[in-house]
Image (cartoon, coloured by chain):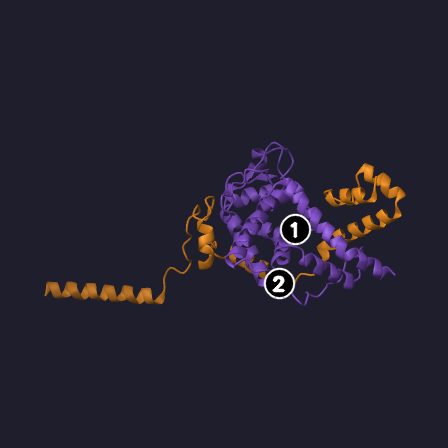
Amino acid sequence: MALFEEFPDTVDEEHILILSAQKGDRQAFAVLVERYWDRLYRWLYHLTHHRHSAEDLAQEAMLKAFAHLSQFQFRRDKPGNTLGSAHRNPPTGKPGDSPSGPSGNFQAWLFRIAYNSFVNQWRSDGRARQVFPRRLPALEEGPVDQVLSREMLQLLARAVGRLPSDFRAAFLLRAEQGLSFNEIAHVLGIKEETARWRVFKARQKLMKVLAPELNREEV
Amino acid sequence: MRCEVARLRLLSVENPARVPADVRAHLVDCEFCRDWHDDLCTFERHIPFLPVPNSRGKAKLLQQLLSEKHVEVPNHPAPEAAQTLSESSALTHTDHPILPHPRLVTFPGLMAGLAAVVLLVLSTWLLHN
């Protein structure tokens, strides 16, 4: 109840969880892990094309987030939202990085930590190209509104996997995570216009490769 | 509006499913662009369903988080990554306290301690006699 009194107009479930976790409540942080693990892991898998690397990076990001959660601050200028601010140094690994850009939500903050770890790993591996796996993971039962065939979904996966990693990271944050250009810019440490450009290029490349395939399939 | 301009506009908006008003007018008249737009939305809608192998990492992390007294944060990069990380001016890895390992008492340590106590007792007895 004290939390409600502390932030009468900006309280929601996630806000409470983060505040509790900031006070050392592991159960509260566990709920956040439950909420964000799959999204983070999926994104990292698409970046690395490697299950163990994606798991390691996701775990590292979660633990860093927990250790540095006190640095995550809520903004009080927008009542009713769970936006926080990463204005005070998040655990980054980027040279000269100072997150003075737009505030992001907790997801953007967490993804930024993960992206910095990914970039560090990428650099330490000598910028090794993430080889797209020959065998794709098995497709699970699709949603009711899925209109693409399994073959087309595999083609889509390959086309996304072959996008340059910068474009892929931005595009997936938009198409899969639903982040705004502003939030994508914050996660990747770039300008909003650059984020827009990367998503634009990714879509353009995908359409160039896939649209003819889709039309052929319909014939 | 030309088809090329309409498509460039659709590629650059945040959500292609929400068509800007000026482009919508073009789509009403142009069947090719309408189909192209449908394809774009179809692909984008299916991105969340791309295959990804199952992960067991979440269960491990939750177990670690909820069972251990101290959670070990990976603040020591791999040797090859150390140089990159040390270049970072804003790196905050050293901000948080180094957490003690849960296993503080080890078998060799215990034996060494016992040996020290025995030696101390022996030397005291020798001094008094």
Residue matched to label 2: A131
Q: Is residue A8 above or below residue A196?
A: above
Q: Is residue A162 above or below residue B94?
A: below
Identify the amino acid type marked 2: Val
Please identify the quadrant where the N terminus of chain B is shown.
top right
Q: What is the x, y in percent for residue A162?
A: 67, 58
- B100 on left or right of A94: left
Identify the amino acid type marked 1: Phe
Apparent colour of chain B:
orange
For label 1, the SS is: helix
- A22 on left or right of B117: right
Can residue B23 be seen at all in this image of the molecule? yes
Q: What is the x, y in percent for residue B44?
A: 75, 51
Q: Quadrant of residue A20?
A: top right
Q: What is the x, y in percent for residue A62?
A: 55, 52
Q: Chain of mark 1?
A: A
